[in-house]
Image (cartoon, rainbow, N blue to C red):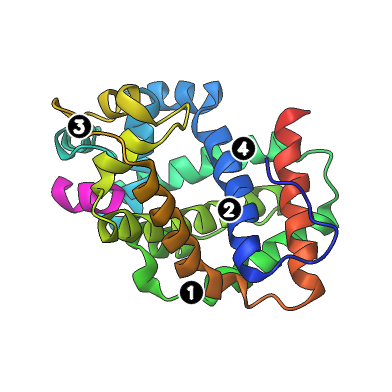
């Protein structure tokens, strides 16, 4: 979890420090047992089925290869399995709405004791950051940005944080290709306990032989990712950057309470 600097961070530091908190907050609701239970109720195939259909549902009823392109870090055959396995009575956009609903419900529980005023302020800053970013940063970013947000502060901030999570995710896809890793090489080179290394490659459907790890290339991809999203965070000026990191850190800390 990022530590709050005593002085206001630069936009580049803010992109890194806030980005980690946003990543972990989103991962919290995606892996929460209630989210997985909801996926089972909807016959979507567990956590991964909801993850594929919920995240990419914002694209509409497109072919699975387009979904695989947008998600990138899951092998296209596994994406196809989950996308084509969605109940025929459920549209792609309905799956996205249901995923956003699950996220908002989780956020309402975690943020129940957080000041509404602070959540409203964080949501406002999230929207300023997102609105300063071009749609080409990523299809999932742009799609989630277009969803109708909840009207309550906790639900709204959970969704706007996920918009920024998808913003960095879209940039990271560009970056791992730029350094020659590709998505599977990035997973192989990561020590992320959820999605890294050989176990992560297997979980995300990548067949053998797996590529060798290249941590130097992954470090460069992370640097490029931050470079791409830095202009969005630069929309916050002076003390707002420190305020934003404080708010994001506070919200992330609710997961440990």
Q: Which residue is mark 2?
A: 19
Identity of the residue drawn at 66% across and 57% down: 151
CA gap, disc 1 to disc 4?
A: 27 Å
Q: Is residue 221 left or right of residue 20?
A: left
Q: Is residue 200 above or below residue 16?
A: above
Dominant secondary structure of the magenta stretch? helix
Residue 210 in the image: x percent, y percent?
A: 19, 29
Between discs 1 and 2, the one toward the N terminus: 2
Q: Tell me the quadrant of the picture where the N terminus can be found.
A: top right
Residue 41 in the image: x percent, y percent?
A: 41, 22
Q: Which residue is mark 3?
A: 78
Q: Is residue 42 above or below residue 175?
A: above
Q: Is residue 107 left or right of residue 50?
A: right
Q: Are marks 3 and 2 in contact (CB under 8 Å)?
A: no
Please give the range of residues in magenta: 62-72
Q: Which residue is mark 4?
A: 105
CA gap, disc 4 to disc 2?
A: 22 Å
User: Disc 3 vs disc 2: which is toward the camera?
Assistant: 2
Label of residue 133 in the image? 1
């Amino acid at each position: 979890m990022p530590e709050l600097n005593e002085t206001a961070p630069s936009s580049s530091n803010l992109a890194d420090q806030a980005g980690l908190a946003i990543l972990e907050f989103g991962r919290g609701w995606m892996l929460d047992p209630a989210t997985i239970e909801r996926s089972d109720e909807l016959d979507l195939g567990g956590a991964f089925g909801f993850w594929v259909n919920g995240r990419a549902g914002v694209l509409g009823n497109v072919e699975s290869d387009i979904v695989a392109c947008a998600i990138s870090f899951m092998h296209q055959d596994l994406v196809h399995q989950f996308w084509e396995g969605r109940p025929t009575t459920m549209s792609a956009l309905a799956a996205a709405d249901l995923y956003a609903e699950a996220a908002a419900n989780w956020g309402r529980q975690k943020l129940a004791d957080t000041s509404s005023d602070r959540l409203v302020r964080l949501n406002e800053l999230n929207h300023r950051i997102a609105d300063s970013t071009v749609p080409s940063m990523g299809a999932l970013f742009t799609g989630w940005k277009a969803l109708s947000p909840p009207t309550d502060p906790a639900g709204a901030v959970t969704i706007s944080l996920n918009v920024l999570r998808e913003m960095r995710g879209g940039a990271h896809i560009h970056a791992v290709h730029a350094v020659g890793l590709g998505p599977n090489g990035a997973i192989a080179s990561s020590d992320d306990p959820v999605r890294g290394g050989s176990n992560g490659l297997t979980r995300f459907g990548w067949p053998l032989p797996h590529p060798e790890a290249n941590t130097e290339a992954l470090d460069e991809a992370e640097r490029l990712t931050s470079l791409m999203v830095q202009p969005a965070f630069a929309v916050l000026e002076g003390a707002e950057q420190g305020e934003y990191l404080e708010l994001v850190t506070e919200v992330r800390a609710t997961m440990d309470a």
